[in-house]
Amino acid sequence: MAAAIAYEPPTISKAWTTFLAHVPTILLILVVTIVLTAIGFVASLALTALGVGLASSGGGGEAAASWAGVLGNLAQWPFTILSSLVGVLFVAVPAMHYASGEIIDTEAALRVLMHRPIRYLLAGVLFTVVVAIGFVLCILPGIAVSLVMPIYVNKVFHTDSSIPDAFSSSFQAVYGSPQGRSFVGIELIAWLLVLVVTIFTCGLASLVAVPVATFYIQNAAYHQGVLS
């Protein structure tokens, strides 16, 4: 059972106020994600350049240069994984807030994240693979799976269900009932507004619009009965 505020009708005003209360946490998540991504990118470039330089001086040719590129990509993977793990908190923090009714500070967010990091990584891998397959087969299935994310993240963080069960139950909750389909409509409208605001501000407003939307959507999931 979530906090009482989770079942109240969602409004942009409430989502905005909740976002403001979580600005320090959201800001830290953003900064850490960007820093980890940047470190991985720089490490990849450095190793690739070093490998190419050694190949050129040693006469290794194209094969050595190719290996340098592979090593550079491998060096980026650990940072990509870490940034993805931290980045999931953008959705998890609203889920934690409405589940507990408390303001989630940075310490609480990181403590929850490090409690079961392997579970969250595996859950992210499964979701990414399914979404990728959906977009490869056809764009619409990929979008349909993407819209399940707020429910899926909530179940992964707040239940002990296996990851496949969390995914299947999330998909059923969203698309297996009239309430779920109404929730999808709310999600689509919310993300359409975020897209419009982002386009008209050259991307700057997304720094605010995206987290506000995540709080609004999580509240809407409880209010619509998709989450309980």
Image (cartoon, rainbow, N blue to C red):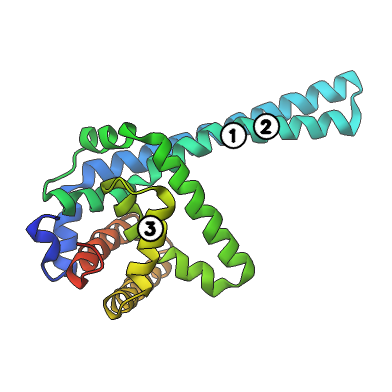
Q: Which mark is residue 204?
A: 3
- Dot 3 and dot 2 residues touching (CB under 8 Å): no
The type of residue carrying mark 3 is Leu
Q: Secondary structure at mark 1?
A: helix
Badge 1 is on which residue?
76
Counting from the top left corner in percent of width and height, residue 119 is at: 40, 40
Left or right: where does residue 103 sit relative to residue 162? left
Q: CA distance from mark 2 to mark 1?
A: 7 Å
Q: Is residue 1 left or right of residue 214?
A: left
Tell me what residue is drawn at x 22 percent, y 41 percent.
24
Q: Nearer the viewer, residue 36 or 8?
A: 8
Mark 2: amino acid: Gly
In the rendered image, the vertical position of residue 150 relative to residue 29, given as above or below = below
* Point 45% across, 41% down: residue: 121
The image shows residue 50 at horizontal and vertical percentages of 73, 24
Mark 3 to mark 1: distance in Å? 27 Å
Q: Are marks 2 and 1 in contact (CB under 8 Å)?
A: yes
**CA–CA distance in space, label 3 to label 2:** 31 Å
Frontmost of labels 3 and 1 is 1
From the top left corner, tell me how far across and down residue 28 is, in percent: 30, 38
The residue singled out by tag 2 in the image is 72
For the N terminus, the image quarter is bottom left
Does residue 109 appear anywhere in the picture? Answer: yes
